């Protein structure tokens, strides 16, 4: 982890959201934290670390009493940021925390940038970059599944896994260094096959971790699930049944749904974004001529397409044509309105496309549909025990792919009998990629990207 000189200025922010509430929390971090406290709480000059104190908070210039607050002082380095830190609990609401913040700024603190506390924690070695990202996910995450992955990542689950990979590559480098040190030996001290095998083994482990990436990244935005089908095929009813609310307007007059509607749904804690179609004739969303409604502007981005066909009716030519256009891996066929056609069940589709027969009205078949959606969208990570590290960001996937490719280039070079010391430059590049991922080396624009999305006060 990088060690850098401690920041010179002292930052302050309101850490809780604005609005009516019982308490608000303000944070101050930096070398002048205690001095700032003395200025807004005159007479209080002997704060003990980690002991709370109820103090009168005043504006340093006017002396006006603003509130009484509970102050906790954390002495460097035993604080979140690694610096001297204050946490000040005031009354909530819109005004009080803002007045106390103004007082802190008048007392010499500077308003913190979004993510600046966590950035300092990172720069002071309290967290690595993966942990810092996990903090953001714990705050912003809306699905239980992402929350679970983030909490685990905050506990260094992913960091540990990446560090193991890095150590394994360094181990391979060590084998090479050893071989290069004894060039005159008839028998190389380390058989090249062992060196090659060691690199190949790391590639396998990186690939296993990368395999979680597509689904891990879906945990953030949710699997985009687009409903399609003829007017009156039961799309809006199914949309509502999946949401558990009366969200889209349902009617038997074709063309009632006024626009594409999007809503978030959770299935077993995994996030989905459902899109129901405009039934409107005049929208360009309708697949021209064949009367199939679909929010076409979502179609190319869809992770899943739920194609609705009423039960008891043969699939017609246009429907077949539409389905043939959708990537089978993303397609789920739903035979709707099953309660109107009791006793009929869909034949297993020879093409292997999952078909679920259901009724949005009675709820039959809905459990099966949820199971199919989960398996299709998140199948690869569903079986993972809660503690398995997941790749949840494009940044992670990019670094891992780069490490994997460097290792593959190393193997190619060994194959081509490139002298080992040259081939080994690829191992170094793989180590660099893994270190950047954990944040062992700090690259400024990486930091800007990671911390730029934080909220103020974290
Ligand atoms: N009996 C029954 N009627 C349904 C079911 N699902 C939808 N409907 C009815 O079928 C009609 C068309 O449904 P809707 O969801 O608006 O279809 P859309 O045009 O594809 O969105 C409405 O009258 C619904 O009440 C179902 O599962 N069972
Ligand atoms: Mg509709």
Image: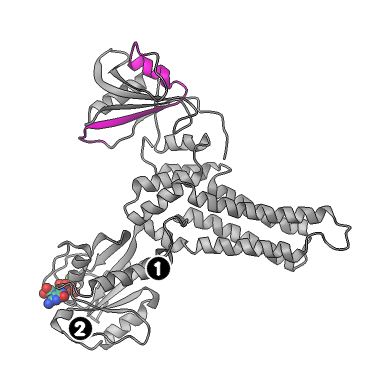
The answer to whether residue 253 is seen in the rendering is no
- Calculate the distance from the C-alpha at mark 1 to the C-alpha at mark 2: 27 Å
Q: Nearer the viewer, residue 218 or 85?
A: 85
175 relative to 294 in the view: left or right:
right
**What residue range appears in magenta?**
18-44
Among the 4 quarters of the image, the one containing residue 201: bottom right
Q: Is residue 215 magenta?
A: no
What residue would you read off at disc 1?
379
Q: Which residue is pictured at 64% across the width and 59% down the height?
A: 406
Among the 4 quarters of the image, the one containing residue 272: bottom left
What residue would you read off at disc 2?
311
Where is 305 relative to 311, above or below?
above
Q: Which residue is pictured at 69% across the width and 66% down the height?
A: 412
Q: Classify the position of the C terminus by image quarter.
A: top left
Q: Secondary structure at mark 1?
A: helix
Q: Which residue is pictured at 48% across the width and 34% down the height?
A: 120
Q: Nearer the viewer, residue 395 or 83?
A: 83
Q: Which residue is pictured at 86% across the width and 57% down the height?
A: 183
**Residue 367, percent across and down?**
25, 71
Where is 10 relative to 439, above or below?
above
**Residue 195, percent across and down?**
72, 61
């Amino acid at each position: 982890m990088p060690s850098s000189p401690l920041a010179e200025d002292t930052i302050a922010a309101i850490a809780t959201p604005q609005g009516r509430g019982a308490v608000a929390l303000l944070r101050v971090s930096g070398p002048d934290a205690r001095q700032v406290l003395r200025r807004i709480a005159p007479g209080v000059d002997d704060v003990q670390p980690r002991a709370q104190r109820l103090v009168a908070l005043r504006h340093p210039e006017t002396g006006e009493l603003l509130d009484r607050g509970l102050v906790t002082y954390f002495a460097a380095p035993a604080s979140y940021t690694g610096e001297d830190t204050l946490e000040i609990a005031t009354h909530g609401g819109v005004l009080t925390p803002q007045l106390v913040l103004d007082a802190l700024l008048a007392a010499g603190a500077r308003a913190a940038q979004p993510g600046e506390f966590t950035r300092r924690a990172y720069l002071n070695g309290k967290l690595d970059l993966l942990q810092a990202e996990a903090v953001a996910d714990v705050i912003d995450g809306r699905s239980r599944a992402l929350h679970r992955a983030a909490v685990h990542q905050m506990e260094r689950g992913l960091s540990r896994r990446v560090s193991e990979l890095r150590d394994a590559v360094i181990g391979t480098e060590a084998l090479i260094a050893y071989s290069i040190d004894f060039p005159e030996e008839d028998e190389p001290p380390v058989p090249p096959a062992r060196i090659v095998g060691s690199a190949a083994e790391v590639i396998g482990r990186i690939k296993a971790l990368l395999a979680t990436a597509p689904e891990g990244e879906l945990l953030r935005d949710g699997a985009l699930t687009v409903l399609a089908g003829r007017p009156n095929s039961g799309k809006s009813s199914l949309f509502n049944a999946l949401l558990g609310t009366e969200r889209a307007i349902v009617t038997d007059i074709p063309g009632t749904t006024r626009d594409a509607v999007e809503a978030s749904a959770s299935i077993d804690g995994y996030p989905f974004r459902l899109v129901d179609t405009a039934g409107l004739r005049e929208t360009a969303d309708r697949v021209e001529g064949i009367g199939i409604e679909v929010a076409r502007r979502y179609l190319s981005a869809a992770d899943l397409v739920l194609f609705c066909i009423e039960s008891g009716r043969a699939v017609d030519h246009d429907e077949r044509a539409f389905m043939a256009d959708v990537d089978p891996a993303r397609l789920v066929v739903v035979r709707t309105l099953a309660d109107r056609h009791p006793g009929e069940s869909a034949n297993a589709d020879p093409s292997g496309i999952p078909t679920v027969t259901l009724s949005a009205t009675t709820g039959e078949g809905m459990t099966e549909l949820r199971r199919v959606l989960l398996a299709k969208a998140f199948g690869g990570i569903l079986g993972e025990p809660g503690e398995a590290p997941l790749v949840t960001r494009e940044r992670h996937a990019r670094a891992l792919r780069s490490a994997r490719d460097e290792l593959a280039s190393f193997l190619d070079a060994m194959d081509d009998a490139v002298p080992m010391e040259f081939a080994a430059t690829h191992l170094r590049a793989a180590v660099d990629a893994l270190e950047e991922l954990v944040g062992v080396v700090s690259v400024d624009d990486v930091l800007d990207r990671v911390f730029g999305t934080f909220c103020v006060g974290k």
